[in-house]
Amino acid sequence: MSSPTPIRFISTELEDMASATGRVAVIVTPEGKMDPAARRANRLTKGALKRLLDSPRFAKAKTGQVISLGWPAGMVAEALDVLVLPRRTSDIEARKAGATLAKLRGDKALLVMSGNMTRAADLAMGIALRSYDFDAHKTVKEDAAKETGEVLIAHSRPEEMETGLVPRRAVAEGVHMTRDLVNEPANVLTTTNFADRLKEMEALGLDVEVLDEAALEKLGMRTLLSVGQGSDSPSKVVVMQWKGGDKDAAPLALVGKGVVFDTGGISLKPAGGMEDMTMDMGGAAVVAGTMRALALRKAKANVVGLVGLVENMPSGRATRPGDVVKSMKGDTVEIINTDAEGRLVLCDVMWYAQDRFAPAGMVDLATLTGAIIIGLGHENAGVFSNEDSFCNAFLKAAGAEGEGAWRMPLGKAYDDMLKSRIADMKNVGGRPAGSVTAAQFLQRFVKDGTPWIHLDIAGVASVKSETDYAPKGATGWGVMALDRLVRDRFEAE
């Protein structure tokens, strides 16, 4: 698994700027005011920085922008990066600024002269989040002979900033794990391999239990098993428990869809773009990354993560359109479309989570519908909920972490679209409001009194262009928001 770039806070020594290799970053305000480090850089470069600040180019600079001066005179560094930030900045602004520095840095050494910046730990987190590249399957690495340079952040209070970075580093590692899982090809990340990776997190203090097909049969998880029965890869459910809160406190349950590859089954998908269906386990990946983050930062909360791991393949054993399957709850489902399989995985795991753990709240995550991409694009995940305060707490957490999320409706009219002639319900409600009817299907498996959120992350789990914090591909969306939700609502004082 990839790990975030090592970052160290050190005491500010202005004399070190001249001999630092790689890149050196200084901070100036949007008004062009220089702190001591920037003034030192200006003297070393014989006034080049001041000339930049007086130029029309700087006058157009925006908060968080970095202007680079290549091969600055008087310095060994290859570049002097001038970061434009106000003295008082938000955590999101600081993180995005750090991510910008990381993108410019590449694999070079980086010295950031942060002065007495209060949000320096967030700037460091931004560097950690953006310092990511999935190259596990490249036989020839670019610049393989070069060692990745060290990232040092000089600060007036390095010990305090290092303490603040510890939980942020844990979250960044969780994000990286989620990205790794989503980026992996399906011939590597099989259901068994996925379960094995999660089992390894016992070393972090998680209790991890892997339920095999025999156990799932005994529990009655027939809808989940129906999805994977056409594949040679065995279906599994993995239960991860973090017990960091009060002994008797009910846990938060996180439930993730883990379809390691989705052909659509008998309702076969078109060939074009099917290779992207390696990311259909994105919900399970977010649950895994969140559990890793919570364990690494030793969260004072009880959280259980459950993921249903299956592969949806066509074969002589595969579920057919028109089949009727009984869920663990006992409701019967008419399978209209075998490509609407994620909800069949989730409904059994959600019911099991409630039966076994009686959670204080439940959040399920899934790359569930293409319809949510039509509605919200790649900027926001779809949020559905049966409880306003729980939903608002998540939306607040997502907003605070800069992860786009937008609440979508639920209602009886949508529920009626799932009526079946021969069973208790159909697994699809037609093309109109496809993401809403999928949520309505899942809501039928939420017990009365259980606060519930469904997150449709099909548009945000993996994208074709880079984001603020990630290169193109897997984003790790959701780990930061869920970690924040746990801190804000479930963590003991």
Image: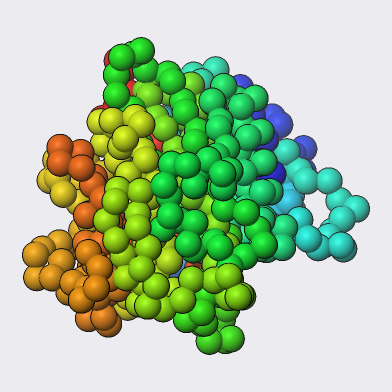
Residue 92 seen from this side: no
Tell me residue 69's x, y (percent): 63, 58
Q: Nearer the viewer, residue 267 or 122?
A: 267
Q: Is residue 6 left or right of residue 465?
A: right
Quadrant of the rendering where the C terminus is positioned: top left
Residue placed at 50% from the left, 33% from the top? 240
Residue placed at 29% from the left, 41% from the top? 362
Tell me residue 320's x, y (percent): 46, 76
Q: Nearer the viewer, residue 40 or 382?
A: 382
Total label count? 0
Q: Residue furthest left?
A: 412
Q: Residue furthest right?
A: 145
Q: Is residue 392 left or right of residue 57?
A: left
Residue placed at 54% from the left, 67% from the top? 312
Tell me residue 328's x, y (percent): 35, 48
Residue 317 seen from this side: yes
Residue 292: which quarter of the image?
top right
Specify how the rendered protein is coloured: rainbow
Residue placed at 49% from the left, 45% from the top? 216
Compared to 385, does 34 lie above or below? above
Quadrant of the rendering where the N terminus is positioned: top right
Tell me residue 455's x, y (percent): 32, 55
Compared to 487, does 95 lie above or below? below
Compared to 13, does 310 lie above or below? below
Q: Is residue 446 left or right of residue 389?
A: right
Residue 219: which quarter of the image?
top left
Q: Residue furthest top?
A: 247
Q: Is residue 472 left or right of residue 93?
A: right
